[in-house]
């Protein structure tokens, strides 16, 4: 019979996206033995594997809300030439955007993990979970022919899709309440060799094609990297000619830290289930077809993109939403729009409710913005269920309704939630119970680690 290798740590983090990586670093800095398990060979999740960017948004008005480990990551990237830092959001959608170079992001997360003493296990896929009563005893991961059983005191599910929670038997929900449909999947494209000077000039000359700018194209000159959405009439024309097969109203694109390198967030794969393995496989295939349509489109129609080359579609299709934990508290869209300040706040955020229509019909795109200076908070109770004492969920899969998730899901807040999960796990590792952690201790540790929290 095949032998199962065994290992252990105080805190086990499954998933090395922004939330899992920052969770591991936080727990490591707090002195715990941490093992971070990631199925790819690098950290960063959607930011590095899905071609997602820029990080959006760290601010409300001029106030930086997301600080702590996430803020430190950006400072380190700035120092190493991997990010120009927080810039004015020239899409006009949020308060700031933070472009970065994806290779620098991978490296900096490696370094921060190493400095925090985190052991990282790459190329390892979570496959199972063993429970005793209301506690997870161990998880099983597979790396090639190696099966590894990992025991620990506290487990953090940072898989984005609540995979560990499901394997542990935790209650979860999926999609919008009326029909369970999730936001569409998108295959982001990363292009290089885009002439941004020509693109800017085109925007100034055709304000009507960039409705997000509401007639004021001067805002695109407020930042050294261009982010915008538009080319509306050109996309419409191509759709009428049958050159674009999917429903999207504008081309949304973001220059990265590297001048002339652009992320195109425009493909749209609706009505498939992001938790169904065959649906996700189909989405990957359709995503590549749409990527080809988009490349033909940008070459044919978009001034400044004539010589653009496709660098990357990434190893993984982008899933905006899938499962949410059903936790001790379910964050509601009213909490987001009402700028709720919870007594157990672990993160603050001001990204708007940003729902991409689950059916692809543009009427289902919904937005809910906060005023500059306003922000909402994320309560600690969204990260655990009373049913499993030593499990925390980090990142976009915490306990919330469908519409609230559409606000906190982006990477600054997902990272801030991860930071808090790591700090909580470090403290709860003492008795292996995250459900009775004293909030004051968590708050103190988070503030020590540089997080921004509302006054107590
Ligand atoms: C198309 C698209 C565009 C977006 N645009 C933006 C944007 O412009 N700005 C922004 O800030 N946010 C954006 N987002 C949102 C953002 O990318 C995600 O919500 C965020 O990355 C969530 O972080 P996370 O750590 O929760 O999950 P992820 O980033 O998904 O990380 C999960 C990690 O867990 C690993 N993993 C998963 N399952 C397993 C397993 N079973 N075993 C081992 N490892 C596993 C994955 O490989 C991954 O590394 C976008 C999302 C999508 C899909």
Image (cartoon, rainbow, N blue to C red):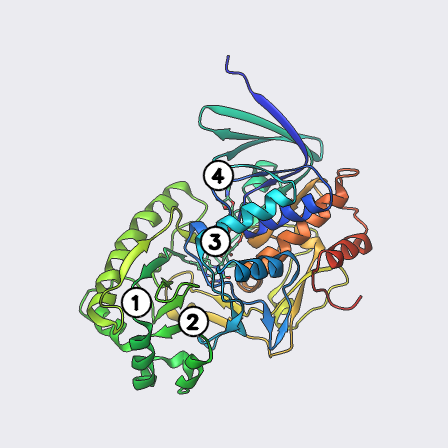
Q: CA distance from mark 2 to mark 3?
A: 17 Å
Q: Earlier in the sequence, mark 2 or mark 4?
A: 4
Circle 2 sits on which residue?
225
Whether residues under marks 1 and 4 lie with C-beta atoms below 8 angstroms apart, the answer is no
Give the number of the disc on residue 104. Answer: 3
In front: label 3 or label 1:
3
Q: Is residue 266 visible?
A: yes
In front: label 4 or label 3:
3
Q: Quadrant of residue 339?
A: bottom right
Q: CA distance from mark 2 to mark 1?
A: 12 Å
Whether residues under marks 2 and 1 lie with C-beta atoms below 8 angstroms apart, the answer is no
Q: CA distance from mark 4 to mark 3?
A: 19 Å
39 over 87 or under it: above or below:
above
Q: CA distance from mark 1 to mark 4?
A: 32 Å
Q: Residue at x 29, y 62 (%)?
A: 246
Q: Earlier in the sequence, mark 2 or mark 3?
A: 3
């Amino acid at each position: 019979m095949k032998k199962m290798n065994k290992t252990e740590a105080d805190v086990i983090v499954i998933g090395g996206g922004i939330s899992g990586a920052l969770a591991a670093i936080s727990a490591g800095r707090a002195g715990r033995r941490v093992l971070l398990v990631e199925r790819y060979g690098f950290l960063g999740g959607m930011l590095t594997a899905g071609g997602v960017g820029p990080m959006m948004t760290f601010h409300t008005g001029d106030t930086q809300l997301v600080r702590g480990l996430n803020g430190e990551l950006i400072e380190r990237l700035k120092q190493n030439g991997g990010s120009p830092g927080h810039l004015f959001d020239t899409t006009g959608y949020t308060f700031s955007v933070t472009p970065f170079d994806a290779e620098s992001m991978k490296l900096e997360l490696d370094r921060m993990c190493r400095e925090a003493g985190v052991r990282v296990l790459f190329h390892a896929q979570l496959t199972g979970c063993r429970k005793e009563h209301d506690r997870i005893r161990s998880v099983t991961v597979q790396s090639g022919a190696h099966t590894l059983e990992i025991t620990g005191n506290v487990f953090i599910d940072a898989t984005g899709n609540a995979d560990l929670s499901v394997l542990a038997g935790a209650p979860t929900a999926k999609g919008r309440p009326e029909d369970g449909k999730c936001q569409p999947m998108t295959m982001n494209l990363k292009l290089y060799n885009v002439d941004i000077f020509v693109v800017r000039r085109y925007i100034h000359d055709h304000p009507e094609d960039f409705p997000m700018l509401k007639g004021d194209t001067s805002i695109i000159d407020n930042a050294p990297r261009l982010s915008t959405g538009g080319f509306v009439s050109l996309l419409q024309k191509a759709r009428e000619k049958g050159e674009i097969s999917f429903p999207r109203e504008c081309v949304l694109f973001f220059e990265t830290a590297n001048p002339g390198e652009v992320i195109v967030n425009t493909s749209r794969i609706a009505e498939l289930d992001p938790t169904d393995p065959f649906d996700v496989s189909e989405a990957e295939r359709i995503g590549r077809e749409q990527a080809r349509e988009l490349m033909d489109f940008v070459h044919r129609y978009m001034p400044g993109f004539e010589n653009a080359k496709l660098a990357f579609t990434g190893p993984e299709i982008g899933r905006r939403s899938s499962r949410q934990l059903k936790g001790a508290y379910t964050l509601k869209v009213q909490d987001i729009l009402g700028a709720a300040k919870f007594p157990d706040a672990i993160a603050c955020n001001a990204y708007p409710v940003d729902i991409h229509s689950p059916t692809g019909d543009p009427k289902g795109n919904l937005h809910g913005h906060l005023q500059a200076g306003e922000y909402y908070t994320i309560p600690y109770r969204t990260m655990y269920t009373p049913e499993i004492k030593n499990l925390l969920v980090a990142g976009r899969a915490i306990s919330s309704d469908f519409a609230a998730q559409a606000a906190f899901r982006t990477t600054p807040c997902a990272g801030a939630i991860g930071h808090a999960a790591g700090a909580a796990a470090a403290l709860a590792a003492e008795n292996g119970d995250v459900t009775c952690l004293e909030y004051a201790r968590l708050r103190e540790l988070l503030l020590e680690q540089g997080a921004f929290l509302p006054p107590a």
